[in-house]
Amino acid sequence: MQEIIEDEYTTPKIAHLAGIVPIAGKALDFQMPWPDAMMPIAPNYIAAERAILECAWAGCETIWVVCNQNSARLLKNKIGDFVYDPVRSYFKHKMPDGKIATMFKKIPIYYVPVYSKNRAKISLAYSVIQGAYSAYYASWRISKWMLPAMYYVAFPYGVYSPKLVSKNRERLSTYENYLVSTEDGKTVLDDECLGFTFSRKQYKQFRDVITKRKIKKDWNDYTIGDVFNNEIIVEYNQIKSKSYYNISNWDGYCKFLGSDQTKYYTNNTIKKYFVDKSYTLYGMIDEPEEEEQDGDV
């Protein structure tokens, strides 16, 4: 991969935050004809949409979904080309005919295909690296002012409230590392599918773990813990989640479905951010309903 230019940051400041949703990787044990990230966690609501919404709550300006080439069209057809910003989507605007419309901000979603020749070496961790590279390279070809300085990773196989990170929305766009953690302190460093941020400088270090074969494994056997728990992120802030389910296997998926958390994932509180996939400037949409009281399910 092309080397990403590193910048030296001495003081925290606002950065361009790009979201990454890694989907391409070794097949899980669901053995379904659709991508594993399209497993439903509620009616008409799939795991990949939860991860995309987490990126939106985190304040990402772009979202990059890394998937196999043959599943990109299916994912795009289900999810669409954008998600509404759940914080800055709702601004009242008076139309010429006197009606009140709502102006909303759209966060673009880009689908990064992994071609068939590379699938044999793709793991979930490699998908994160591929997403960061694609976000940087595509932005670089447009303007240096659009280059992402930080990346937020949201995994489709970790289920917790996507609104959880909104409490730290502004800080997530600074040059500090933030990791979502469980009540007992487990994070992505412990091989859990929990969100985290990393910088352009750290991207190169993560990439080298894989490309320089620092761990004696096949590329597609690299776990997220192998790559991201390599003493690269040594100082970080934690965002604790009261509830977390790892659905990267059938047993974990059944445990989530048997919990009382599924009642929070409904069309009223989730799907409104994915409505109206047309490219219009204005849309008539309902005011957002209140989410769960503690913002963490």
Image (cartoon, rainbow, N blue to C red):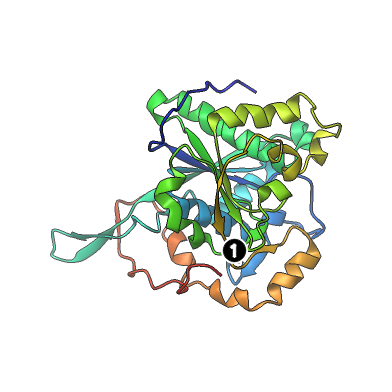
Q: Position of residue 268 (x, y in %)?
A: 46, 73
Q: Is residue 151 left or right of residue 276?
A: right
Helix, strand or loop at mark 1? loop
Which image quadrant is residue 198 in? top right
- For the residue pair 157 and 275, the one nearer the viewer reads as 157
Q: Residue at x 65, y 23 (%)?
A: 1
One can see residue 171 in this view: yes
Q: Position of residue 25 (x, y in %)?
A: 74, 44
Quarter of the image that includes the C terminus = bottom right
Which residue sits at x=62%, y=38%?
233
According to the picture, the residue beneath numbered tag 1 turns out to be: 160
Any part of residue 143 in sight: no
In-image side of 232 versus 26 (left or right)? left
Nearest to the observer: residue 40 or residue 8: 8
- Image x and y of residue 53, in percent: 51, 56
Q: Who's the residue at 50% across and 71% down the image?
A: 267
- Between 3 and 120, the one lying in front of the other is 3
- Residue 225, position in %: x, y? 74, 44
Question: Compared with residue 47, is residue 73 higher up or lower down, i.e. above or below?
Answer: above
What residue lies at 13% left-to-right and 63% top-to-bottom?
A: 97
**Local crowd size for mark 1, using a 10 Å CA cut-off: few (<14), some (14–19), many (≥20):** many
Q: Residue furthest front?
A: 235
Q: Amino acid at mark 1?
A: Tyr
